[in-house]
Amino acid sequence: MVANFSKKGNREILMFQAAGIVFFAIILVLIVADFKIYQKKHELTMQLADLQKQVAGIKNSSQTLKEEIANSNNNDYLEKIAYEQLGQQKPGEKEYIFTQPPEKPKAPTAAQNPFDSFLNWLKSKF
């Protein structure tokens, strides 16, 4: 038996196929758009974290400056700043700087295992 396809049936099949292609194209566009939105969200989240760190640093700096302004009339604080930051001394004081002697180079240790010395010799050849 030979199937008899009418032109109307072919049109329905073509319309169904076209609708399927359009549907998959729309789905593909939505997936790409969703991925781009995800990337942008991730980027903005990272920027937000960086800005929050900067804000915290600025708040700490602001607090330190407020404390320094509050202590600007305190003679003990001014003396401390003069010692630490300006390197000033009271009359009759001497400043001593202690340095450490330079480190001596360590002597190379001999390999405990004769196989290790063979491997080192072999590595030096190649």
Image (cartoon, rainbow, N blue to C red):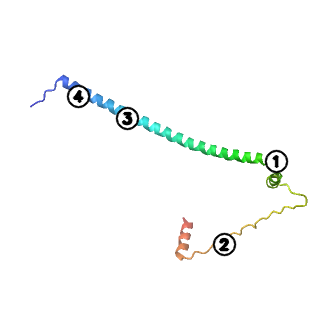
Disc 3, disc 1: CB below 8 Å?
no
Q: Secondary structure at mark 4?
A: helix
Residue beneath label 4, please? 13
Quarter where residue 55 is shown: top right
Judged left or right of residue 34, residue 122 is right
**Residue drawn 88% across and 57% down?**
90
Dividing the image into 4 quarters, which one contains the N terminus? Answer: top left
Closer to the chain start, of discs 1 and 2, is 1
**Which numbered disc covers residue 107?**
2
Residue at mark 3 to residue at mark 4: CA–CA distance: 22 Å
Residue at mark 2 to residue at mark 3: CA–CA distance: 67 Å
Q: Is residue 73 above or below residue 118?
A: above
Residue beneath label 1, please? 73
Disc 2, disc 4: CB below 8 Å?
no
Amino acid type at image mark 1: Asn
Within 10 angstroms of label 2, few (less than 14), some, or many (20 or more) residues? Answer: few
Amino acid type at image mark 3: Leu
Judged left or right of residue 98, residue 31 is left
Residue 66 horizontal/vertical position (percent): 73, 45
Judged left or right of residue 31, residue 67 is right
Closer to the chain start, of discs 2 and 4, is 4
Residue beneath label 3, please? 28
Amino acid type at image mark 4: Ile
**Residue drawn 46% across and 37% down?**
37
